[in-house]
Amino acid sequence: MYQSPARVFARLGATGPATPPSVIMGRAVVLGASVAGLLAARVLAEHAESVLVVDRDELGAGTGHRAGVPQGTQMHVLLPAGRDQIDRWFPGFSRQAVAEGAVLLPAAARRSYLDGQRKVPGSDVDMIAASRPFLEELLRRRTLELPNVTLLPGRVTGLDFAGTSVTGVRHESATGPVVTPADFVVDATGRSSRLGDWLEQGGWERPPMRRMAINLHYATATFRRTEEHPVPVAVLAGCTAAAGGDIAGAAFSAIEGDRWIVMLGSYGDDRPGRDPDDLVRRCREDFPPEFARVVANEMLGTVRTYRQADSRRRDFHRLRRLPAGLVAVGDAVSSFNPIYGQGMSSAALHASCLSEYLRSGADLRRPARELLALQRVVVDAAWGMSTSADLARPSVPGPRPPGYRISRWVADQITAASVTDPVTARRFDAVVEMRRHPNSLAAPRTLLRAVRVNQARER
């Protein structure tokens, strides 16, 4: 029976009890101990006799920034949808994170600005904040507590196939090349995934890839935090294309270790650099006064920069031929402009897709097309939100899809009304936080209300 994307999205975001799991495979192998890979391993642990996670980095307790996650030094946001799913798979994860140092971000202690104007509160959901290494290390620890999950260091070099299925993973070990037999393989190796190469080498098709150039630049620094209970505890200052051109905005949040993390983002030629004085100056001159108070503290370490040239998605659902027992998750499927914070929450929803597929009587002898259909709903939602906003930037080349002017006008109306109207703000934030599908903002009553709010403000 057909269900709209919005209904499927809501089902995937549910956190209630699911149907009981059953073991339907022997060994599952996950490529990459990223957030997406660890969540996939957690799901697979309910359906496989054993789960092996292979990662090229040496990972242990207290592992900090690592080569396999080059963006790990930057500010990360765990949106409520992602937090809900992680708490679903690892009960008590949020409480444990806060107990070990992560910072609780109550809705009342967060502030948002748009083009310098403070927005009315739109969310009543608490969040948690921590560095990417902190969250990933705790997630890895919880995953490896599962009795049938093992982590193995090694560089994956390819896949083995027999007939219409994947049968093994080729990787380097301390003693040389190894082939590990597998009944099911999950690629979670990120946006630089080589799965397309491995498929071609095995006589299969490479998934078509869509790219949209964004030329995004980040600069992030941490500062000492001396206040135990600061208010606000996090601030987001966004800039629309009409007001800021290629300046995306700035954000800060309290994180573990009695620190503040501060981020600046921009597009094109407006590149925040590694000069600490420049970052402090920008925070003081270009953004709300809360930023000046945070950067008045001692800077810890150096300014870290990061560039992302494009958003990209691999459309596995468009493949005519696909081996059975092989799927991809997380950035290996789609990686968006990180300014919107969708990455970890998308990965968590991909885990929900995997769970629904495996619990629904999946036939592992056939390609996982049911999973691809579920993933497509999640990817389309995040891709549509991020690319629509990016295309409004003067330095983003496009092309603009048919109907873009109308869809952009609708988005601008909703965004503008969310600044002053609490009802629109609640609906808007539910989508931004990935708790609702973007189609919910296209409801006639929502758009009509937004237009009326904006017209009243202009009088």
Image (spheres, rainbow, N blue to C red):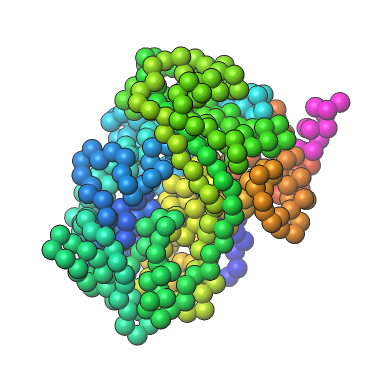
Q: Main secondary structure of the magenta part?
A: helix
For this view, does 327 lie left or right of residue 183?
Answer: right
As for residue 405 lying within the magenta part, the answer is: no
Percent x, y of residue 455: 83, 32
Q: Height in image: 17 above or below 389?
A: below
Q: Residue furthest bottom?
A: 163
For this view, does 298 lie left or right of residue 333?
Answer: left
**Residue bounds of the magenta highlight:** 450-459
Q: Height in image: 365 above or below 84?
A: below
271 or 57, which lies in front? 271
Say which quadrant the C terminus sits in.
Answer: top right
Q: Is residue 139 visible?
A: no
Say which quadrant the N terminus sits in.
Answer: bottom right
Residue drawn at 38 percent across, 76 percent down: 201
Q: How many marks?
A: 0
Residue drawn at 60 percent across, 68 percent down: 2
As for residue 451 lying within the magenta part, the answer is: yes
For this view, does 187 lie left or right of residue 376?
Answer: left
453 or 241, which lies in front? 241
Q: Residue furthest right?
A: 459
Q: Height in image: 12 above or below 456?
A: below
Percent x, y of residue 166: 33, 76
Q: Height in image: 222 above or below 433?
A: above
Percent x, y of residue 390: 63, 46
Percent x, y of residue 101: 31, 28
Q: Is residue 458 visible?
A: yes
For this view, does 458 lie left or right of residue 172?
Answer: right
Residue drawn at 76 percent across, 56 percent down: 403
Residue drawn at 23 percent across, 47 percent down: 59
